[in-house]
């Protein structure tokens, strides 16, 4: 039986943790089973997502950014991971640029270094049309009613590289994330599953947020979820264009100038350790 040894870096962004792998200088192609093993916190490295840095096929991009969830599934987008991705390629000497462009399964992303402590990420232009999210609805609407096991919740549905369902709550600490999160994530109206956000609006410039991430569960921070919640609140006229988002892991800052414009998210990214692991 052949084996493969992988050199990796463990990183986190506000507690959302990642195994980051250089596939520019290593020949690596992960299977879903291998990704699940690597993400296992008892038998593998342990992480919310595995981020793979690959060469870009298109000359206008610096890298391809590939993301695997803890369940082994490949997904389109991860905003917290993007900040770690940017710090990784700089720290590893793969680039010396202060602004890089990457291509993902969810579209292009632009990553800028604001300082040694903060990376600013262009998360792309939000998509609200149901068939683009994707979400089963007869037409686009500001909010939708979702049936969940005998009850209903009202959500905003949108995509920022990946699909999100955002609902408001009066008290984020008491929000039914563990109960409703899995039901929303796998709801049949979201054919590719969805990230479930629970947002408490503090004032026009601040929200508190918990997210049950697709294929992962609740995490200390979700970058694309922070962007989706901010956009949903702005669309309803309840938030200003720059919003401080408090997640369990700390603070993110999201800016959006309105429909047709990209969402920008700023926050930290940190290295924890480097290592090697052998896979069969």
Image (spheres, rainbow, N blue to C red):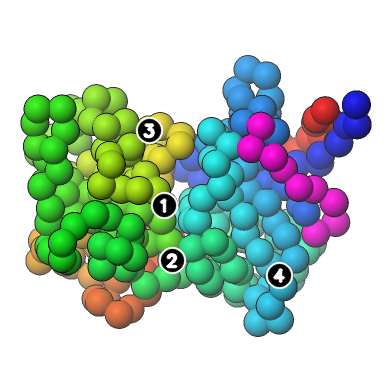
Is the residue marked by circle 4 packed among few (<14), some (14-19), or many (20+) residues within 10 Å?
some
Residue topped by disc 4: 56
* Badge 4 or badge 2: first in the primary sequence: 4
* SS type, badge 4: loop
Location of the C terminus by quadrant is top right
Residue topped by disc 2: 123
* Badge 1 or badge 4: first in the primary sequence: 4
Are discs 2 and 1 less than 8 Å apart at CB? yes
Distance (Cα) linking label 3 and label 2: 21 Å
Q: Nearer the viewer, mark 4 or mark 2?
A: 4
Is the residue marked by circle 1 packed among few (<14), some (14-19), or many (20+) residues within 10 Å?
many
Is the residue marked by circle 3 packed among few (<14), some (14-19), or many (20+) residues within 10 Å?
many
**Region rendered in magenta:** 24-33
**Residue at left 43%, top 61%?**
161
**Residue at left 30%, top 64%?**
131
Q: Quadrant of residue 95?
A: bottom right
Q: Is residue 241 above or below residue 167?
A: below
* Badge 2 or badge 1: first in the primary sequence: 2
Are discs 3 and 2 less than 8 Å apart at CB? no
Distance (Cα) linking label 2 and label 1: 9 Å
What x and y, as percent, mark residue 49? 56, 41
**Which mark, residue 218?**
3
- 241 left or right, relative to 264: left
Are discs 1 and 3 less than 8 Å apart at CB? no
Residue topped by disc 1: 223
């Amino acid at each position: 039986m052949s084996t493969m040894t992988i050199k990796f870096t463990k990183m986190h962004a506000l507690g959302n943790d990642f195994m980051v792998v250089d596939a520019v200088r290593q020949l690596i192609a992960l299977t879903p089973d291998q990704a699940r093993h690597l993400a296992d916190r008892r038998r593998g490295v342990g992480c919310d997502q595995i981020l793979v840095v690959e060469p870009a096929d298109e000359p206008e991009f610096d890298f391809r950014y590939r993301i695997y969830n803890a369940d082994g599934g490949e997904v389109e987008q991860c905003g917290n991971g993007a900040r770690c991705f940017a710090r990784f390629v700089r720290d590893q000497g793969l680039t010396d640029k202060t602004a890089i462009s990457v291509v993902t399964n969810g579209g292009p992303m632009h990553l800028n270094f604001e300082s040694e402590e903060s990376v600013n990420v262009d998360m792309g232009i939000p998509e609200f049309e149901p068939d683009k999210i994707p979400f089963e609805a007869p037409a686009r609407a500001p909010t939708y009613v979702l049936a969940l096991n005998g009850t209903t919740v009202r959500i905003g549905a949108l995509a920022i590289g990946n699909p999100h369902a955002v609902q408001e709550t009066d008290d984020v600490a008491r929000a039914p994330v563990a109960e409703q999160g899995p039901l929303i994530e796998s709801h049949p109206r979201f054919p590719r599953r969805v990230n479930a956000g629970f947002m408490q609006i503090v004032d026009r410039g601040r929200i508190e947020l918990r997210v049950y991430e697709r294929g992962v569960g609740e995490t200390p921070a979700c970058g694309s979820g922070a962007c989706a919640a901010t956009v949903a609140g702005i669309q309803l006229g309840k938030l200003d264009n720059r919003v401080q988002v408090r997640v369990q892991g700390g603070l993110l800052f999201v800016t959006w100038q309105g429909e047709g414009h990209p969402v920008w998210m700023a926050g930290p990214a940190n290295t924890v350790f480097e290592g090697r692991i052998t896979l069969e």
